[in-house]
Image (cartoon, rainbow, N blue to C red):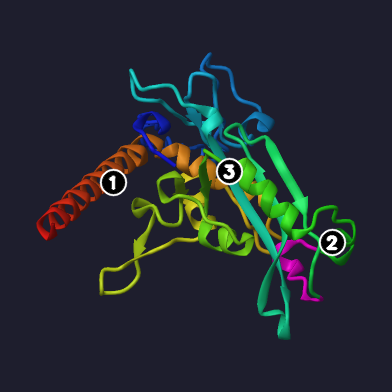
Amino acid sequence: MAFTNQNLALGTSPSQPSSPSRHGKRGGRHRRPRHRRANGRPRSDSESSDSSTTNAAGNHKDDTGRRHQQPKNAPKVDENLFVAIDCEMVGVGQQGKQSSLARVTLIDWNGEVIMDEYVQQQEEVTDYRTFVSGITPEMLQDAQMDYDACRQHVLTLLEGKLLVGHGLKNDLRVLGITHPWQMTRDTAKYQPFMKVRFEDGILWPRALKELCQEKLSREVQVGGRPHCPKEDALAALDLYKLVHHKWEKAMEYKINKTKAIEQKRQAFLQLAGAAKE
């Protein structure tokens, strides 16, 4: 597949979120902060709790109600180019240590579900991992799609798309597929989202839950309830939206650098071949 800069939706990231306002005390009592609309009227609780969204103008708004403006003159996001994914697995084999695909969820740029399928199992499930996966025997008994059909359907949906997710290596591995690195956006591997754990200075991925708390002021993967694949896919997508502009600029540089290296390699091989003649 040939990659051009036109394939990449460059320059559409919102700017960094501003610091939340600090609400002081009045009369010695803490007052609950109330978000306000642009027209000055207080925002209702239902409005304040909405998931982060991106409006028609491409401006991103997180769960705190803060709006992250797109850079002026930034190209419009090609919404049809993006797909976010999350998979849930169950355990098969001895002690359920081997992962088997049980559910696949894909969403589009606007958070709309474009695929959500439970997958028939080819082996006996020895650990449903329900406390994390949310998968129960009843869910898999009603599964309509086998592994091969699911895999092929995912491949079709991902063709020519920029794939967003968190820890995509695990999702792609259990699906038995690959995706071009130029078209992959893994929020677990985005360096500004990573952190140094030890004195060796090596960057390590951070948990999706931790990133969402810090960057989106959102709770996901809450203890005591199983993960929701749509919620996790949307969280990864919203993290990507926060840094879209910077990320795509970095990817443009990497892609162009890779092309330049490949051109030099081809030129060297041609010279070496001509010398042998």
**How far is the residue under mark 1 from the one under mark 2?**
42 Å
Q: Say few, some or many: other residues with alpha carbon within 10 Å of mark 1 (under 14 / 14 to 19 / 20 or more).
A: few
Nearer to us in this view, 27 or 174: 174
Q: Secondary structure at mark 1?
A: helix
Q: Secondary structure at mark 3?
A: helix
Give the x, y percent position of residue 262: 25, 50
Residues shaded magenta: 124-135
Give the x, y percent position of residue 127: 76, 76
As for residue 130 lying within the magenta part, the answer is: yes
Q: Horizontal placement of 268 versus 2: left or right?
A: left
Residue underneath mark 2 = 140
Give the x, y percent position of residue 75: 38, 22
Question: Which is nearer the N-term, disc 3 or disc 2?
Answer: 2
**How far is the residue under mark 3 from the one under mark 2?**
24 Å
Residue underneath mark 1 = 254
Residue underneath mark 3 = 158
Q: Where 188 falls versus 124 (above or below)?
A: above
- Residue occupying the point 77% across, 71% down: 128
Number of numbered discs on residues: 3
* Residue type of the residue flagged with mark 2: Leu
**How far is the residue under mark 1 from the one under mark 3?**
22 Å
Q: Horizontal placement of 229 versus 141: left or right?
A: left
